[in-house]
Amino acid sequence: MRKVIASEMLSIEGFMEEERGQLDWFVQDEELNDYAMNLLDSVDTIIYGRITYEMMAGFWPYAPGSFAARTNELQKYVVTGTLKETPWGTWNNARPLSGTLAEEIERLKKQPGKDMVIYGSGSIVRELTEHGLIDEYRLIVNPVLLGKGKPLFGEFSGRIHLKLNEAKVFPSGVIALAYVAIKI
């Protein structure tokens, strides 16, 4: 069965973005780019929420480099209740998911193929976490304190046990933590 991997850039306090949505605090270095590319090469599907999709679709189709090229060729599913008339052809292989999120993800997990990744899209990560449908969390912790912002998990009812699968420190001070969800 395919896995769902949530890959999230976070501040030290666990914020996905600053209070007004700024993302200019993300730290990058060559090793971190290689790490991100290895993840992208291990999947064949990206799952986005509508807001993240609209932000990404405005940038990645025109961006240079191998990460952009790989992102553009992958299947992309967008969780949305409002984008019925969006011209999906504006970004290669993008289409909306219909039905309830948990049912759609369970259906996709059963299909043949490589794993799937979610970038950003905190509300989707939270909902899938509530349903036990995230198999791995890749948390990329940036060496920054934001003070205020949008937390990845916010209010979460329940408990998910995790096992640290990998921890990697990059020259930039970023730490990548890969946790596997343990089914109890």
Image: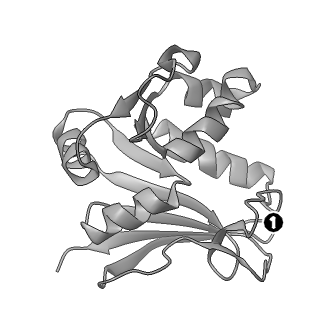
Residue 111 in the figure: left or right of residue 65: left
Q: Residues within 10 Å of mark 1 (few under 14, many from 20)?
A: few
Label 1 residue SS: loop
Q: Nearer the viewer, residue 154 or 69?
A: 154
Decide if residue 180 is in sight here: yes
Residue in view at x 73 percent, y 53 percent: 31
Q: Quadrant of the C terminus?
A: bottom left
Q: How many marks?
A: 1
Give left or right: position of 178 versus 96. Answer: right
The answer to which of 165 and 14 lies nearer the viewer is 14
Report whether residue 38 is seen: no
The residue sitting at 83% across, 57% down in the picture is 24
Disc 1 marks a residue whose amino acid type is: Pro
Q: Residue 46 location, x and y as percent?
A: 45, 39
Tell me if residue 88 comes above or below residue 179 in the rendering: above
Q: Residue 130: x and y, percent?
A: 29, 71
Viewer-nearest residue: 123 or 14: 123
Question: Residue 10: which quarter of the image?
Answer: bottom right
Quadrant of the image occupied by residue 141: bottom right
Q: Nearer the viewer, residue 144 or 178?
A: 144
Q: In the rendered view, does 77 fall on the left or right side of 60?
A: left
Q: Residue at x 31, y 80 (%)?
A: 160
* Residue, far top: 89
**Residue found at x 36% / y 79%:** 162
Image position, residue 50 (x, y; %):
51, 42
Residue 108's place in the image compared with 73, above or below, is below
State left or right for residue 140 relative to residue 25.
left
User: What residue is disc 1 on?
Assistant: 171
